[in-house]
């Protein structure tokens, strides 16, 4: 295709499209309803920015140090079932930022997260904690992997995330001279 033209075809509307309400996982609506059922005065308000809080890389990715940020929790054997398909397990939550050595494998789990357990098996830890793949990519020279990864708590408080957890993760990334971060939420 010529310069300035997209490399893909623009799809035209068709009568075969499903209606807007026909979504496989209506996560946002269900979460709002869940918060009201828990007794909160207002439904959950999603963080929605008018401008993305991202900064372009100052150098090519291959010359950059990349940090992994995860919401997965370290496995805690004394906190009940945390394996694939485990029921929601609030006891496995963590409430402070944690860090780990990227040179070693870590057992992280996601039972502390409210995800669709009916349609997801949660058997592939690479989907929520792709550290082995990032080490492989770093070995190929795609980037330098930071010495530490960081765990971001999911305690449902935007205030705590913005005022406590995010600044702590940023400080740790700066200590590690990180140029870019990959957030893998669960």
Image (cartoon, helix red, strand yellow):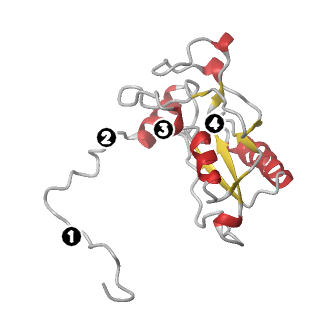
CB-based contact (under 8 Å), mark 4 and mark 2: no
- The residue tagged 4 is 156
Relative depth, front residue between 57 and 145: 145
Residue 3 placement (x, y as % from top left):
38, 89
- The residue tagged 1 is 12
Instruction: Label 4: state its secondary structure.
Output: loop
Mark-to-mark CA distance, 4 and 2: 23 Å
Name the N-terminal-most of marks 2 and 3: 2
Mark-to-mark CA distance, 2 and 1: 22 Å
Name the N-terminal-most of marks 1 and 3: 1
Mark-to-mark CA distance, 3 and 4: 12 Å
In this rendering, the label closer to the viewer, 2 or 3: 2
Instruction: Label 2: state its secondary structure.
Output: loop
Res. 179 image quadrant: bottom right
Direction from residue 68 to residue 23 in the image, left or right? left
Name the N-terminal-most of marks 1 and 4: 1
Mark-to-mark CA distance, 1 and 4: 39 Å
Q: Which mark is residue 24?
A: 2
Residue 22 versus residue 93 in the image, above or below? below
Mark-to-mark CA distance, 1 and 3: 33 Å
In this rendering, the label closer to the viewer, 1 or 3: 1
Residue at 82 percent of width and 47 percent of height: 172
Name the N-terminal-most of marks 3 and 4: 3
Direction from residue 67 to residue 127 in the image, left or right? left
In this rendering, the label closer to the viewer, 3 or 4: 4
Q: Residues within 10 Å of mark 3 (few under 14, many from 20)?
A: some
Instruction: Label 1: state its secondary structure.
Output: loop
Q: Residues within 10 Å of mark 2 (few under 14, many from 20)?
A: few
Q: How many marks?
A: 4
Q: Which mark is residue 32?
A: 3
């Amino acid at each position: 295709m010529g310069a300035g033209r997209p490399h893909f075809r623009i799809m035209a509307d068709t009568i075969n499209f499903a209606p807007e309400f026909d979504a496989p996982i209506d996560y946002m609506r269900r979460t709002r309803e869940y918060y009201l059922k828990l007794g909160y005065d207002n439904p959950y308000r999603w963080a929605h920015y008018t401008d993305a809080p991202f900064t372009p890389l100052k150098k090519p990715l291959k010359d950059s140090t990349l940090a992994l940020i995860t919401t997965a929790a370290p496995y805690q054997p004394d906190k009940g079932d945390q394996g694939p398909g485990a029921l929601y397990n609030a006891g496995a939550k963590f409430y402070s930022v944690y860090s780990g050595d990227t040179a070693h494998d870590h057992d992280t789990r996601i039972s502390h997260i409210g995800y669709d357990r009916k349609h997801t098996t949660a058997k592939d830890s690479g989907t929520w904690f792709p550290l082995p793949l990032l080490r492989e990519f770093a070995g190929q020279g795609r980037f330098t992997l930071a010495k530490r990864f960081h765990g971001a708590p999911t305690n449902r408080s935007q205030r705590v995330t913005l005022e406590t957890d995010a600044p702590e993760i940023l400080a740790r990334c700066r200590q590690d001279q990180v140029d870019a971060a990959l957030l893998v939420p669960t």
